[in-house]
Amino acid sequence: MLTLLEQLDKGVLWQSPGGIHPPQFKTLSNQSAIARLPLAKRFVVPVPLVGEQATLTVSVGDTVLKGQVLTEGSGFTYLPVHAPTSGKIVAIEQHATNHPSSLPTLSCIIESDGQDTWCELTTSNLAQLSKAEILGKIKQAGIAGMGGAAFPSHVKLNPASEIDLVIINGIECEPYITSDDRLMRDHSDEIIAGVAIIHHLLSPQRIIIAIEDNKPEAAHAMKAAISRSSLPQDMVRVTVIPTKYPSGGEKQLIQIITGKEVPSGAIPAQLGIVVHNVGTAYAIQDAIYHGKPLIERVVTLTGEHIGHPGNYWIPIGTTVADTLQSVSFTTSIDQKVIVGGPMMGYALADLDVPILKGTNCLLVPSPNEIAPDVDEKACIRCGECAVACPALLLPQQLFWHSKAQEYDKAASFNLKDCIECGCCSYVCPSDIPLVEYYRVAKSALKTAAEEKRQAEQAKIRFEARLKRLEDEKNAREAKAKEAAAKRQANMKASDKDAVAAAMARIAAKKAQTESHVNSEEASSSVAPTAADPKKAAVNAAIERAKAKKAAQANTSSVPVATNNAEDDKKAMIAAAVARAKAKKAAQETNATSPQESEPTTVTAIDDKQARVAAAVAKAKAKKAAQETSTTSSQESEPTTVTAIDDKQARVALAVAKAKAKKAAQEASTTSPQESEPTTVTAIDDKQARVALAVAKAKAKKASQEASTTSPQESEPTTVTAIDDKQARVALTVAKAKAKKAALQHVTQQDDAGLASPIADTATLNELHILPTENKLAEQPADCSDQKPGADLSPEQIKKAKVAAAIAKAKAKKLAQNAEQEEQ
Amino acid sequence: MTSIFIAVAVLTLLALVFGVILGFASKKFKVEGNPVVDQVEALLPQTQCGQCGYPGCRPYAEAIANGDHINKCPPGGTATMEKIAELMGVDEEPLNAQAQSAVKKVAYIREDECIGCTKCIQACPVDAILGAGKLMHTVIAKDCTGCDLCVEPCPVDCIDMIPVETTIQNWDWKLNTIPVKVIHSEQEETAC
């Protein structure tokens, strides 16, 4: 019994199950040496990993050189992308890609400058590099498997387990493709140099270059190259295997060469075997010895509709359309362009897609090369497919379950081991496109698995959230409990003290009353002076309040709401005058000199002047009060007085506002009885809006007054800020009320059966309020800032926006409610 | 006469023995919880959306195990309902919620309009919304289950449910994608 190595050396071959012998069309394209095509103008370089594992190192408008790296990233399977030629990046956008779906993926569009200038290349000597450095260089060159799957090569060159056997795959079993054939004939020495690098990295016991017997020239060239190379002659050999499709499949090839079957779900490395394509070997030596990244590959352009079929070096990123143009292809009705071979390839939906690292063939067949689409007939259970299947599956069972969409049953028949070689479809007498059914089933299974994974993830997150909420609740409870305990403890400690303190207070009070009675006569001369300013202030406030009330009475008695604004203004003026007078009175009582301000106050017509005057007067009154109080006694506190005044004024204003609102509301609620409902709504809205605006203005004014009256106090801005806030709150409340009024109106109208149009108008009107409100809100805010001419600060704008958003939301809710009621 | 006594005695003895065995087995091999609940829960889509009226998928699974209707899961759609019907051995029922499109969606917050109210964060059952008070919020798209629960609480209506984009990764192979057929038999003859 010979060992495996001895058998390998003797070239013993095993049988792989199944397989077919399709007609060969290799001579169409393998007659001439690999040529080059004129450089295309435009290149599409997909960068699918950007956003996941990688970032772009270039931006639109950048000039790039040939071989310049476009992305950088990390991750074990990350591969950099390089510019295929020198030129300018004109766009980075979603572009259809070379995939059966033709779905767009992020791509760099490079416009060639025609120079094809290389970037700086670093050549190196294999002997000076460590294995890690070699692997790094292979990775940086972006080398992926050239056989079609485009798996990152550096991963396969750095296996976890020991590798005994390396198979270099030069089988190329697809009927049309000859790119590896030509590469082996034309560049055998380079391929062997690449094989030497693989040998250096993996140190296997044997390296076998497998070539099908329909490529005798290639086998001959490789044998010659091995004898020329410095590789140990006894460990590298070319094994010629009989032509059969699909011998080029990784698992099938391993079975033919070694007789071992790769278990389901395992990779060849677990058997100590690695398979590399000849194209990959070529790319590896190019990367190590010349420093060139993988930016071009040999592509077979074949089919009877191509003028000059053959193999060409095509830069990766050249579009299929450009490529076909330069080999003068003719087109027919319903022309198909197939990427890959006729057995495993896919037809392109869009020709403006790039050539990728795994694109080994473009097939443009004429109608007599490819059978017309025939209708699929019923499966007759002949079992031909089971004989042809190289993976020893039961295709008709898989088909049965896939067609019935019982994907889990299909999975139980090892659907995942199907290599989609197409042998079953080829032999099927009923023309059933079996592989397509398997692809559909596979992607459905993949989706289901992904959904399951996501559901699992969601469940974990949901449970984590529940736990978090529970924890938070517990923490809150514990905290509350702790606080309660603390409080109780404190109370216990201070209980006695509190009782004692209370007793002491009572005693002190008693003593004080006694002493007070004794000294009453003595202090009586001081007391009236102290009380005077206080009294004056109180009087002024009362008077002001009365003035307000009068103004309000005026407003509410006038039923026509359009007059409201005017009335309000009048009332305001009156109020201002009254206030000023009150102040004056106060001043007079305090025996200061108010004569200067008198004429202006009287003659003041516009309320601004009045306000300024009032403010000045007030300020003076305050000052006087302050002075009096400081001189007379320490008991009276001027700031408190001012504060009280302000507060009163504000309260009065608020009351006035509320009343104005109520009036507006009443007007709107009563108006439905009047004739035209829609117009009334509009008017009501308008009224409400006007009232609202007035109210807002008042609120602002109040805040302004407050800020003007308080110059003596230390922090005027703080006060203004607080006032602003209050004013805004009032404003929102007012707005809400106006909304409610409008809504009420709408609901009443609904009963009349005129619902939807009015509801719409109402919403619309409410929405129309927005800009006005914004403006109004901004203007007074500006004034209160006491910075005339200054622009609105971004903060204010933001606040206004937030208010607008809230108002919008409310309007929405109202509209919704209205609709619901209507239903 | 004695034979009757013997028969009764033997049967009584047997009943006692089996009674002891059953009693022991019920203690020893007791199953915690209802295993059907786990099976039903595995079928539910785990969006935790609460559209069934229960706070999450597991409570609904428990309700189904206790005989609730199986048609209350709009995210799962008819497919899930059919699977549950099969598992529970009950008749299929049409979904009672409005016809839900099978398209998977994720929430998207229009970030310019977000006012930072945190209401959507509180509504999200899987904590897939990121943000803080008065700061912009955003959805972690890969963790979003598309349950819709954040849309309603948003006061400024800045959340959209957008369908998940089809990419090369999640693209489904459809039949007749490749209308390529094998080489014609005439060619075969000429080539051979």
Image: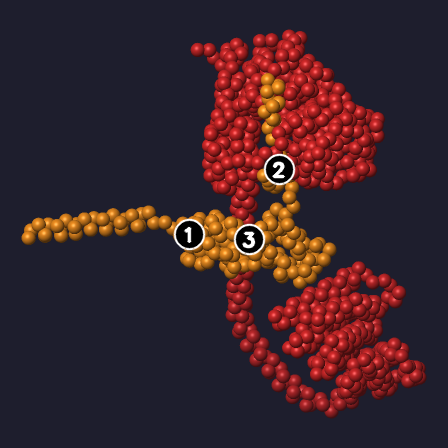
Chain colours: A red, B orange
> Are dots 1 and 2 in contact, CB under 8 Å?
no
Closer to the eye: label 1 or 2: 2
Q: What residue is at 57 percent from the left and 55 percent from the top?
A: B100
Q: Which residue is mark 1?
A: B88
Point out the image quarter for the N terminus of chain A: top left
- The chain letter under disc 2 is B
State the separation of the CA atoms marked 1 and 3: 19 Å
1 and 2 marks on the same chain: yes
Left or right: where A702 falls relative to A216: right
- How dense is the environment of label 2, judged by Cα within 10 Å: few (below 14), some, or many (20 and up)? some
- The chain letter under disc 1 is B
Which secondary structure, mark 1? Answer: helix
Q: Tally the numbered discs.
A: 3
Q: Amino acid at mark 2?
A: Thr
State the separation of the CA atoms marked 3 and 2: 29 Å
Q: Which residue is mark 2?
A: B177
> Are dots 1 and 3 in contact, CB under 8 Å?
no
- Quadrant of the rendered structure where residue A109 is? top right
- How dense is the environment of label 3, judged by Cα within 10 Å: few (below 14), some, or many (20 and up)? many
Q: Earlier in the sequence, mark 1 or mark 3?
A: 3
3 and 2 marks on the same chain: yes
- The chain letter under disc 3 is B
Left or right: where A481 falls relative to A638: left
Q: Which residue is mark 3?
A: B75
- The x and y percentages for residue A719 are 77, 70
- The x and y percentages for residue A236 are 59, 12
- The x and y percentages for residue A421 are 56, 28
Q: Residue furthest front?
A: B186
Q: Classify B15 as above or below A171.
A: below
Q: What residue is at 55 percent from the left and 30 percent from the top?
A: A425
